[in-house]
Image: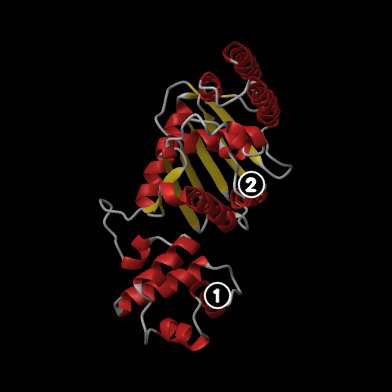
Amino acid sequence: MNRKLNENLVSAIKSALPEKTNVALYLMDLLSLGKEAVYRRLRGTVSFNIEESALISKDLNISLDQIVGMRSAEKAIFNLNLIQTPNMMDDYCASMRTYIQALRKIKPYADSKWQSACSSIPCPFYIQYALISKFCLYKWAYQMRGFDSTLKFAQFVIPQNVLDTHEEFLNENRFIRSGSFILSRNMFTSLAKDIALFSRLNVLTKIETQQIKEELIDMICNLESITAAGTLNVNSNISFYLSNIDFESSYTYLECSDFELSIFRVFSFGSINSLKPEVCKVHKEWINSLKRSSTLISRSGDVHRAEYFNEQRELLNTIL
C-alpha cells in the first residue's frame, strides 16, 4: 500500500471510530499487533497490508472506495457477504453482523434511520420466533446442502453462535429511531406455502406444522399491533407500507448524518453492501419509488391494515 492509501485508511479509521476511542488500542486488539507495530502503521513508516486493510474495512464498515480514493460515479467497490456451504452458519453470522455493526454505528445519532423494502418477512420480526426462525434456516440449509429425507426438521439444530447473533441483532435493533418498512403482500403466504411443501415432503410433522402456524398467527397479530402504533419501541417512529407491485429482492438503507450504507439481499441470507454515496443515493431513491407505489398502513391506514391482516390469517388457515 502506498503512502497516500495508508493516509486515507488512517483517516477513515479515525472518522469511523466513536469519539475518545483510542485508535492504537483498537487496532492492537483487532489486528493482534504490538503497540509499536501499530504506531508505525499510524505514522506511515509501515503500511497496512491487504489483509489488515480488509479486516479493518469489514469491522468498521469503511468503504474501500474511500480508501483507494475512487471518485468515479460509474465505478464502485462492493463488500460481499456471500455464504459458502462448508462454513455456512459462520458465514450467516458474519452477514448478520453487517446489520449489527451498522446499527451500532447509527445508534448514537438522533437522525438515524432504517429503511427496508422486504420481499420476505423482515428479519427483525421473524427471528423473535423460535420455530419460524428455525424453519427459515432449515429451508435455506436444505437448499444449500441438498439434505435427503433422513434429516428431519426436528433433527436440525441451530448453532449457539447463530442464536447469540440473533439476540445481539435484536438488542441493537431496539435503538432504531425512525424508518420505514415496505412489505410485500405475499410474504406470509409465500412462507406458508414453503411450510406446506416441507410437510408434504415428510420432513415436518403435522404437530410441527401446526406449531409453526401458531407462531405465524401470533406474528401477524403482533405486526398488526406494531403497524397500528407506528413504533417498535417508545422512542421510535416507524412507517409501514403495503406494496402494490412486486419487487424481486429485499433492500435496506441505513443512514445518519455521518454514515450511510446500502444493503442488497442476495441468495436468501447473503448480501452485497456499498458505502459509496452514489450507490446509496440511487438505492435510497429506489426504496422511495417503491413507497410511492405502496399503501400506508401504519397509524391512520385502519381499513387497509385490517383488510390485509385479516386476509393473511384466512390464507394461512387455507394453506396450513
By what rule are the colours in the image chosen?
secondary structure
Farthest residue to the front: give it. 150
The location of residue 163, given as percent across then percent down, is 63, 47
The location of residue 135, given as percent across then percent down, is 57, 33
Describe residue 114's horizontal placement relative to residue 75 as left or right: right
Local crowd size for mark 2, using a 10 Å CA cut-off: few (<14), some (14–19), many (≥20) = many
Residue under the image location 52 percent in, 24 percent down? 198
Residue under the image location 49 percent in, 29 percent down? 149
Kind of residue at disc 1: Asp
Residue 129, can we see it? no
Figure check: 301 above or below 110: above
Local crowd size for mark 1, using a 10 Å CA cut-off: few (<14), some (14–19), many (≥20) = few
Secondary structure of the residue carrying numbered label 2: loop
Q: Which numbered mark, 1 or 2, is in the foreground of this view?
A: 1
According to the picture, the residue beneath numbered tag 1 turns out to be: 29
Kind of residue at disc 2: Arg
Q: Which is nearer the eye, 115 or 138?
A: 138
Q: Determine which of the numbered discs, if any, sits on residue 297 in the image.
A: none
Residue under the image location 63 percent in, 58 percent down? 108
According to the picture, the residue beneath numbered tag 2 turns out to be: 177
Figure check: 256 above or below 223: below
Q: CA distance from mark 1 to mark 2?
A: 31 Å
- Give the quadrant of the N terminus: bottom left
Figure check: 262 above or below 242: below
Figure check: 270 above or below 211: below
- Give the quadrant of the C terminus: top right
Residue under the image location 58 percent in, 50 percent down? 112
The location of residue 48, given as percent across then percent down, is 38, 76
Q: Which is nearer the eye, 199 or 249?
A: 199
Ranked by sequence position, the earlier of labels 1 and 2 is 1
The location of residue 168, given as percent across then percent down, is 64, 52
